[in-house]
Amino acid sequence: MSPARILVVLTLLAIPTLGHAQRAVVMNFGGPGGSQARSAAVRAASRSLQVVPQGRAASVGSPSSRQGRRQIARELNLDFIIMGRVTGRGRGAHTEITVFGSNGRELASENARRPIGQAGRADVTRATSAAIRTAQRRGGGRSNRRERDNERRRERDDDDEDEAREERRRRARERREREEERREEAAEERRERRSRARERARERREEREERAERRRRRRRDRDEDEYEDDYEDDEFSDSRLIPKVMIRLGVDARTRDVTITLTDSRRRNFEASLYPEVTGRIEAHPLIDRDAALRGLYLQLDVAFAVGLRTLETDPANPMGERREIETNAWRFLASLGYLIPAAEDRVRVGLLVGFGHDRFSLAENQTLPSTSYNTARIGLVGSFGAYGTLMQTRLDIGYRFLLGAGDLSTAFGETTTGGALDVGLSLGGFADVGFSYQLRFGYSRYSLRFAGPATDFTATKGTDSAVNLGIQLGWAFH
């Protein structure tokens, strides 16, 4: 082939490439100074690209996603989409420029200084030009039919991938729905089983009551005068709801707060944050199996011993000095006797308790507070309500303690010490048929003290001693 013909062929092949000016759009830049950064980027893009107004691209779609960028490039016949933002503040601010291809993928990215001053804007222009050149080298644009075909194939692959992803999501939703249906069916089956169990329990209870009534009639016919003394039927008696003896042991968390007001309005304060106690309770209904009035007789004993109790004292003359550890121990008990009136087949009980208690809080020699040793006589009301058979019993105690003595505190702040204490207790417990028993309990007590006459230490007018305890006990019920 002659040189002239070769030149003609090369010229014809170059005509489409030379006639195609690459098109681009520069989107708004985010951040402080974004408009100045975009202006510098537009100047850089105009040198080698045909820049389309940004408003036309904004009317087509959002460039925040790859799908949106691909739609903008297709609608506006674009080769590149240039985006950026200004991040940071002050001297640490910088400009990020990113160039995307017509398929929406990132082709190049550059960083520049903040667009402040001529030097900053010039650096943004330089970085934009560098990013455009990198994008062109990496095959950006729509230079020939083969690349357009490849791009269409990639778009189809992306669409297929999106469809596959949506299909996976749909299958996952269906699996979740089937799992939810299975859980609902299982819950409904459990509810039905519980309902059937309650129905069987009700039928058994009615059967027991019917048999018990038949036995009572037979006993009445045989010897009505001796019925109340001879009739014992533990198997079908409602006294099964109340055990003869219940023993529990547990742990309480307890606080103590003592405040003494002196005659010169100063105060002596002692505060013990949460410390553990080993606790025990014995309850007894010795005559519960009788049908006579004596079946309401009730005995109760509560004991508690502090464990790991420590006290640190600050010297009043040198509050910022080193604190001194004081040997401390505490224990208490309360013995009560009373009568609880059973009602509603022994599910409700209301009654009165009287008792004697001792509460000792012993402190070694210190400059703040003497040891306390309260001896009290208590009178109180108690009420309990049972639910779910014997599994849940709620009990409320309210009482008042008359102070009989206060130990070393009696003469430390006055010649005589008088007063009393209000206490409130709330518990939730129960026991199983096999005998296992539990109880969650909360208690609050507050002593109000009054001092009169001269004192061996500092003379005071009044004082308070309050305590809060929260604990759990486990044990066994004996019928």
Image: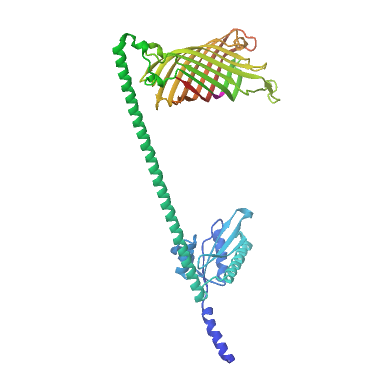
Q: Is residue 170 above or below residue 195?
A: below
Instruction: Return the x and y of residue 108 as percentages of the image width and height.
Output: 58, 65
Q: Is residue 400 above or below residue 392?
A: above
Instruction: Return the x and y of residue 9 as percentages of the image width and height.
Output: 54, 86
Q: Is residue 72 visible?
A: no
Residue 418 sits inside the magenta stretch = no
Instruction: Return the x and y of residue 444 as percentages of the image width and height.
Output: 51, 21
Total marks in image: 0
Q: Is residue 457 visible?
A: yes
Residue at figure coordinates x 39%, y 38% from the top left: 190
Residue at figure coordinates x 44%, y 55% from the top left: 169
Residue 253 sits inside the magenta stretch = yes
Name the residue nearer the viewer: 440 or 370.
440
Colouring mode (rainbow / by chain / secondary structure / one colour): rainbow
Name the residue nearer the viewer: 171 or 331.
171
The quarter of the rendered structure image containing the C terminus is top left
Instruction: Return the x and y of residue 350 as percentages of the image width and height.
Output: 40, 17
The quarter of the rendered structure image containing the N terminus is bottom right
Name the residue nearer the viewer: 80 or 310.
310
Magenta stretch, main secondary structure class: strand
Residue stretch rendered in magenta on the structure? 250-254
> Looking at the image, which residue sits at the far front?
222
Residue at figure coordinates x 53%, y 71% from the top left: 141
> Looking at the image, which residue sits at the far bottom?
2
